[in-house]
Image: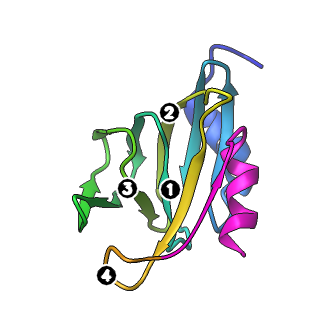
Amino acid sequence: MELLVNVRKWIEENKTAFLPPVCNKLMHRYQLNVMFVGGPNERKDYHIEEGEELFFQIQGDMCLKIIENGKHKDIVIREGEIFLLPARIPHSPQRYENTVGLVIERKRLKTEMDGLRYYVGESANVLFEKWFHCEDLGTQLAPIIQE
């Protein structure tokens, strides 16, 4: 895999991979997982990760729904903005049509588990959750979302 990449060209060549429900394509998987995510997506789940995640919105705006201290909160990340999500915050990226964002996560330790959680409406009551060791978010999330 190339270490120096023309991002616009890479996005154009891989745009068919941005399919629901997650709409992402992994570019690099080393100590950092570097992925691009397109829209629109179809997600009601919340992801929980032991490490921080960096969101950079390249094209268009997105809404990152989070639950912090038991309360739902929307963080709008506009085109050109970066947001650093702290560790262990349940989050649900909502991406609109014709948008593209860059997401960077660190490689998981073998002892770490990611969570995928659904809530009852706008409450903080958990409807369903599943924990798993995440090696490839692009392939592992979709089957759990579809459960």
Three-letter code, disc 3? Gly
Q: Alpha-carbon distance for marks 2 and 3?
A: 18 Å
Q: Which residues are magenta?
A: 127-147
Q: Residue 115 lies in what quarter of the image? A: bottom right
**First in sequence: mark 3 or mark 1?**
1
Three-letter code, disc 2? Ile
The kind of secondary structure element at disc 4 is: loop
Q: Residues within 10 Å of mark 2 (few under 14, many from 20)?
A: some
Q: Which mark is residue 47?
A: 1
**First in sequence: mark 2 or mark 3?**
3
What residue is shown at x 29% (from left), y 51% (from top)?
A: 77
Q: Residue 119 lies in what quarter of the image? A: bottom left
Q: Which mark is residue 104?
A: 2
Q: Residue 84: percent from the left, percent from the top?
A: 31, 36
Q: Which mark is residue 60?
A: 3
Q: Nearer the viewer, mark 3 or mark 4?
A: 4
> CB of mark 1 within 8 Å of CB of mark 2?
no
The kind of secondary structure element at disc 3 is: loop
Horizontal relation, residue 78 to residue 10: left or right: left
Q: Nearer the viewer, mark 2 or mark 3?
A: 2
**First in sequence: mark 2 or mark 4?**
2
Residue to which mark 4 is pinned: 122
Three-letter code, disc 4? Glu
**First in sequence: mark 1 or mark 2?**
1
